[in-house]
Image (cartoon, rainbow, N blue to C red):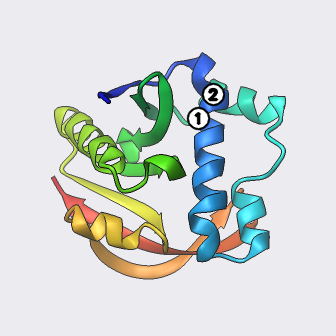
Amino acid sequence: MVLVIREMRADDARLFLEVHHAAVRRIAVHDYPPEVIQAWAPLPITQAAVEAVAANPEGEIRFLAERDGQIVGLACLIIPNNELRACYVAPEAARTGVGKALVVKIEETARDAGVKYLVADSSLTAELFYRRLGYEVTEYSRHLLRGRWPMACVKIRKAL
């Protein structure tokens, strides 16, 4: 079972959302109330949502983790913001090294672009994962989902 980390293509947008939603709805669901989960990963996945992800309006650099032809993880980077925007792993691939491989690729890409540190608004669910990868907590805060729904988060930082 070889893990491949590759750049996301626009036609991967539905798979991206499926992995994101599965991670939120089956892993993060234990740390957040239903209204946050619904705002974070709304169902059903609509064609409009797929098109919005494919459009990539913020210019994220996106990577997918693929194992045996299946997408099992995703990660996003916004270089101008020094931001690790996202890292999600499909529940069936959790705790198998997929998330770590994605973060390593994000950090390598950021370093190659001259980024000296990364920041992120992590979910409470992922705090320990990021700590194990050398990220330090700078504060506990709130993140606004879709600009409207407050979600508890952990602000993290790592020097590269």
Left or right of residue 157: residue 25: right
**Quarter of the rendering occupied by the N terminus:** top left
User: Percent position (x, y) of residue 44?
Assistant: 84, 44
* Tag shown at residue 5: none
- Indicate left or right for 63 with 138 as reference: right
**Considering the numbered disc 1 on the image, is that residue within a helix, a strand or a loop?**
helix
Residue 42 point in image, percent of width and height: 78, 52
Please determine whether, in this image, residue 13 is positioned above or below residue 126: above
Q: Which amino acid type is shown beneath numbered disc 2? A: Ala
Residue at far bottom of view: 140
Above or below, comparing residue 147 to residue 33 in the picture: above
Mark 2 and mark 1 in contact? Answer it, CB < 8 Å. Answer: yes
Q: Amino acid at mark 1?
A: Phe
Q: Is residue 132 left or right of residue 58?
A: left
**What residue would you read off at disc 1?**
16
| Residue 57 seen in the figure | no
Determine if residue 116 is in view: yes
Depth check: 122 or 102 in front? 102
Tag 2 residue = 13
